[in-house]
Image (tube, grey):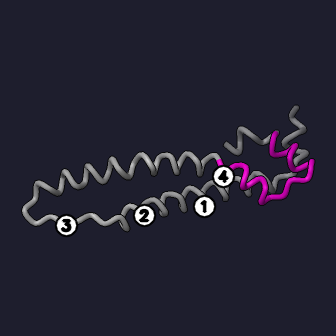
Amino acid sequence: MAEQRTKEIGVRKVLGASVLNLVYLLSSGITRLILIAIVIAIPVSWFAVNSWLAGFAYHIHVSWFLFLTASLAALGIAWITVSYESIKAAIVNPIKSLKTE
């Protein structure tokens, strides 16, 4: 996404956007998508796990903490990845991204 928006990042940087603003710009869309995926995935996975465990004689109760931990881990990994790529794109000299036009 950062590679596709290099010209936009260059223009925003020339107009005075900080690195934090650019990171927020690129990570907000991904965060929304991940939160939507989490909202859809938690009920489906809870139902699937409980249905699968019901067939066992000694089954365990699946805690909400397991889903919370997995959701936070997915969100954290996505933030780290997007932040790294967007910081890398924001540090580049804006002249290089705008010069190709």
What amino acid does circle 3 point to? Ile
Mark 2 neighbour density, 10 Å: few (under 14) some (14–19) many (20 or more): few
Q: Earlier in the sequence, mark 2 or mark 4?
A: 4
Q: Nearer the viewer, residue 69 or 7?
A: 69
What amino acid does circle 1 point to? Ile
Q: Nearer the viewer, residue 62 or 93?
A: 62
Residue at screen point 58% across, 48% down: 32
Q: Earlier in the sequence, mark 2 or mark 3?
A: 3
Question: What numbered label is drawn on residue 68?
Answer: 2
Viewed as shown, does residue 7 lie left or right of 35? right
Name the residue carrying label 3.
60
Residue 38: x %, y % from top left: 45, 51
**Bounds of the magenta segment:** 8-28
Question: What numbered label is drawn on residue 66?
Answer: none
Name the residue carrying label 4.
27
Question: What numbered label is drawn on residue 80?
Answer: 1
Residue 13: x %, y % from top left: 87, 50
Q: Earlier in the sequence, mark 4 or mark 1?
A: 4
- Whether 24 is among the magenta residues is yes
Mark 3 to mark 1: distance in Å?
A: 33 Å
Residue 24: x %, y % from top left: 72, 55
Mark 3 neighbour density, 10 Å: few (under 14) some (14–19) many (20 or more): few
Residue at screen point 19% across, 51% down: 51
Secondary structure mainly formed by the magenta segment: helix
What amino acid does circle 4 point to? Ser
